[in-house]
Amino acid sequence: MKMNSSRVCKIKNIRTLINLVRSDEVGWFEYQGKAIFIGYRNGVDGQGLNRKQRLYKRRRSQGLCVACGKKVEGENRATGKPFKLCDEHRKKSTKREQ
Ligand SMILES: [Zn+2]
């Protein structure tokens, strides 16, 4: 069996490394004798959230339905927080749960 490690690119200097990290390049590279993986942070912000989670968080904090983005009426009496789903989506999800 052949080892598939021949695709590792050697990086000669730090500038190339920085350019690679900033680019959309994904894969294994070798820098100063160490194997490093570049590109795994794509689409993830400093809090470790991806785009979908950010959208969810934003809608949640603005009191919008996390499914469709509509303004949510009413709040959860148990937590005092606005519902995370609008009437329409809340009906759908509670029906499924019961
Ligand atoms: Zn909705």
Image (cartoon, rainbow, N blue to C red):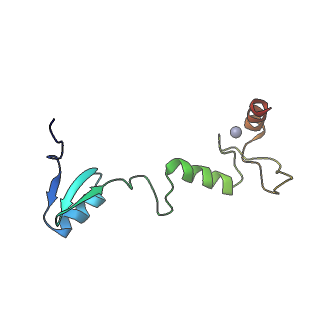
- Quarter of the rendered structure image containing ligand 1: top right
Q: Position of residue 55 (x, y in %)?
A: 57, 50
Residue at the location (21% across, 56% down)? 29
Extreme residue toward the right, this view: 77
Left or right: 36 as drawn, with respect to 70: left
Q: Position of residue 60 (x, y in %)?
A: 67, 53
Q: Please tell me which residue lies in front, 6 or 79.
A: 6
**Which quadrant does the N terminus fall into?**
top left
Q: Is residue 17 above or below residue 65?
A: below
What is the residue that sits farthest to the front in this orientation? 1
Residue drawn where x is 39% and y is 56% of the image: 41
Residue reaching furthest bottom?
14
Residue at (81% x, 56% y) in the render: 79
Using the rendered view, name the quadrant where residue 97 is placed.
Answer: top right
Q: Position of residue 98 (x, y in %)?
A: 80, 32
Q: Is residue 41 left or right of residue 63?
A: left
Q: Quadrant of residue 57?
A: bottom right
Of residue 19 and residue 64, the one placed in the foreground of this image is: 19
How many marks on residues?
Answer: 0
The residue depicted at 30 percent of the width and 51 percent of the height is 24
Q: Which of 54/96 is in front?
A: 96
Rendered location of residue 72, percent (x, y): 76, 47
